[in-house]
Image (cartoon, grey):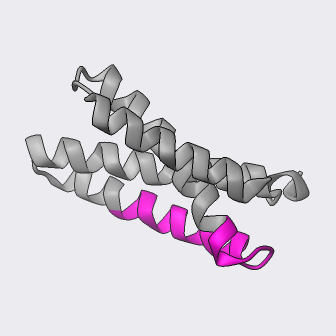
């Protein structure tokens, strides 16, 4: 079970999810400041950093960073769309470049 959790795709997904959750908490904190969103920001960033450190034990920093960035980009764009924030063509093109660059590095 522990081996499954430490597999790179699982760690990348967890890390991206944790960073995206921190982004969600920051958005909430910007609208409604309080201790709960502040604690959530700290907890999710700590979890993301731990997962990223585990990944860096296995891979070069460039590979790790690009993989996490691509996954996080998708999650944050989905979140932004879900809460009704408009995404411009320029933002979508930028996301496409991030994802395309990730695909180039990962293959």
The percent coordinates of residue 34 (x first, y second) are 13, 51
Q: How many marks?
A: 0
The percent coordinates of residue 82 (x first, y second) are 34, 21
Please give the name of the residue rendered at 44% of the width and 41% of the height, measured from the top-left corner. Answer: 95
Please tell me whether residue 45 belongs to the stretch shown in magenta.
yes
* Left or right: 88 as drawn, with respect to 57: left
Please give the name of the residue rendered at 63% of the width and 52% of the height, measured from the top-left corner. Answer: 102
* Left or right: 70 as drawn, with respect to 42: right
The percent coordinates of residue 56 (x first, y second) are 70, 76
* Left or right: 97 as drawn, with respect to 55: left
Give whichever of 37, 93 is nearer the camera.
93
Relative to 83, does residue 33 appear above or below in the rendering? Answer: below
Give whichever of 64, 98 is nearer the camera.
98
The main secondary structure of the magenta stretch is helix
Give whichever of 94, 52 is nearer the camera.
94
Please tell me whether residue 68 belongs to the stretch shown in magenta.
no
Residue 78 visible within the image: yes
Please give the name of the residue rendered at 34% of the width and 53% of the height, measured from the top-left corner. Answer: 40
Residue 17 visible within the image: no
Please give the name of the residue rendered at 59% of the width and 71% of the height, measured from the top-left corner. Answer: 50
Relative to 73, does residue 7 appear above or below in the rendering? Answer: below
Q: Which image quarter: residue 87?
A: top left
Q: Which residues are magenta?
A: 42-63
The percent coordinates of residue 16 (x first, y second) are 54, 51
Relative to 17, does residue 83 appear above or below in the rendering? Answer: above
């Amino acid at each position: 079970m522990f081996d499954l959790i430490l597999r790179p795709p699982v760690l990348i997904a967890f890390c991206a999810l944790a960073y995206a959750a921190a982004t969600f908490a920051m958005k909430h904190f910007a609208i409604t400041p309080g201790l709960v969103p502040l604690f959530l920001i700290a907890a999710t960033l700590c979890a993301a950093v731990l997962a990223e450190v585990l990944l860096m034990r296995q891979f070069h920093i460039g590979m790790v960073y690009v993989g996490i960035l691509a996954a996080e980009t998708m999650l944050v764009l989905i979140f932004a769309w879900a809460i009704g924030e408009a995404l411009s063509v320029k933002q979508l093109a930028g996301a496409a470049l991030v994802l395309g660059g990730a695909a180039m590095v990962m293959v």
